[in-house]
Image (tube, rainbow, N blue to C red):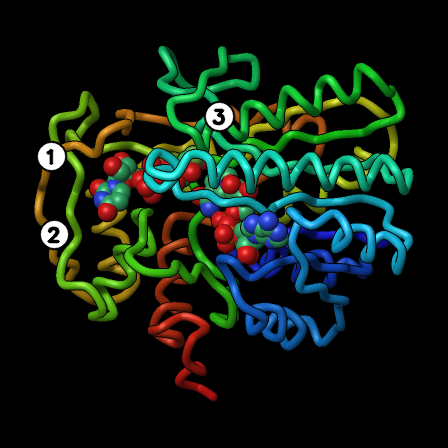
Amino acid sequence: MKILVTGGAGYIGSHTCVELLKKNYDVVVLDNFSNSCEESLNRVQNITRKKLSFYEADLLKPSDIHQVFKDHKIDAVIHFAGLKAVGESVTIPLKYYHNNLTGTFNLLSAMDQFNVKNLVFSSSATVYGDPTTLPITEEFPLCATNPYGRTKLIIEEVLQDLYQSDKSWSIALLRYFNPVGAHESGQIGEDPQGLPNNLMPYISQVAVGLLPRLSVFGSDYNTPDGTGVRDYIHVTDLALGHILTLPKLTSKPGVATYNLGTGNGFSVLEIIKEFEKASNQKISYQITDRRPGDIATCFADSSKAKKELGWETTKSLEDMCKDTWNWQKNNPEGYRKHSKED
Ligand code: NAD
Ligand code: UFG
């Protein structure tokens, strides 16, 4: 089976390419490198000792997408490509709407034209807004609290409309909780451009000495230690969720939604403590004001993915911190410099 992976050079995409190649899928990557670089794909091929096809191409250019479908008989698409920084989406919403929505519409039109109707879409737990009870099931009410989240919500609705109009589509909406960690080899991992927005890459850059200290955004939440609680999931477990979704797609048309999380919530202070243990480094931090838009607690009920896909997470918080540290210490400046071991 041949899988087109949009955004395959990015953080989650590159880890998913590793697992696809390991399972002997043929992989074609389309990425414009707006938030990644080719080195991640070189390393995917090093890890697996297998080749993938790669197109430096932009979803905003229909002719780029058509070229890929002309060159390859694609069986299914895993669609990661998009912009993802929540804060930035508030400052430059039009760029987010254009890239994420227009890019997706161009992809869907090309898929329709080339009769490729199996799609896995990267959605997010952000579509649940601030949930009133926990854990979060797929049936919870949906809302968007920022332009990034709205792009996810709109695309989910567009995909429902698409299926209603043509029942031969088979679509999975995967709602990720908080992806962290790196491949166990330490060769690929999260490589944020500029100051990290998310907790784990920020902590690991403090640990390696690139940043002086972490700001803990608020200690007065209604949580056991007052800091925000999230459902962190190892990126390899997340990648494997995509692999298990593919046979389901090709077996029956429809739109299915799955939460991909561990079901466990950890606070910011718990993450700092676990990371200090895994890295044997002191993480300097200060408590600051809450970050606007943050919620207190978020964790998943992923029993539907377990029941219908046979998917379960196997990696612990210790694994997530150890693997993040292994990636960070071997690649202190991400993909920009060759790793220390090179
Ligand atoms: P990432 O930025 O590392 O990867 C996205 C990739 O898409 C990048 O390689 C980028 O260059 C590419 N891209 C962006 N716009 C493109 C375009 N117009 N044409 C071609 N390529 C384009 O992000 P990630 O963390 O790997 O996230 C992957 C997907 O998962 C995104 O859709 C994101 O919104 C979603 N998601 C991520 C998280 C998270 O915390 N990382 C959580 C929930 C959902
Ligand atoms: N935090 C800090 N300091 C930091 C960064 C984060 O204290 O420097 C705290 C936040 O306040 C929050 C927790 O760490 O309590 C996690 O924050 P992240 O920014 O890592 O993750 P979020 O839960 O805010 O959001 C992430 C993605 C969203 C996605 C969501 C659910 O950024 O795109 O997970 O999947 F929608």
Q: Where does label 2 land, which residue?
A: 285
Position of residue 284 relative to residue 243, above or below, is below
Residue depicted at 83% across the width and 27% down the height: 169
Q: Nearer the viewer, residue 331 or 9?
A: 9
Q: How many marks?
A: 3
- Residue 156 appears left or right of 29: left
Q: Rounded to the nearest whole Å, what is the CA distance between mark 2 and mark 1?
A: 13 Å
Q: Rounded to the nearest whole Å, what is the CA distance between mark 3 and mark 2?
A: 32 Å
Instruction: Quadrant for residue 131, please give it.
Output: top left
- Residue type highlighted by circle 2: Tyr
The label number, if any, that marks residue 338 in the structure image: none
Q: Rounded to the nearest whole Å, what is the CA distance between mark 3 and mark 1?
A: 25 Å
Residue depicted at 52% across the width and 34% down the height: 97
Q: Where does label 1 land, which residue?
A: 289
Q: Residues within 10 Å of mark 2 (few under 14, many from 20)?
A: some
- Residue 80 appears left or right of 143: right
Dot 3 or dot 2: first in sequence order is: 3
Q: Nearer the viewer, residue 36 or 271?
A: 36
Q: Residue 202, how many percent across, how many down?
A: 27, 55
Q: Residue 21, how many percent across, how many down?
A: 74, 62
Position of residue 7 relative to residue 175, above or below, is below
Q: Secondary structure at mark 3?
A: helix
Q: Residue 142, how many percent across, how many down?
A: 49, 15
- Residue type highlighted by circle 1: Asp
Residue depicted at 31% across the width and 54% down the height: 196
Mark 3 sits near ligand 2, with its Cβ under 8 Å away: no
Which numbered disc, 3 or 2, marks the residue closer to the eye?
Answer: 3
The answer to whether marks 3 and 2 mark residues whose Cβ atoms lie closer than 8 Å is no
Q: Where does label 3 land, which residue?
A: 150
- Residue 48 appears left or right of 298: right
- Residue 92 appears left or right of 255: left
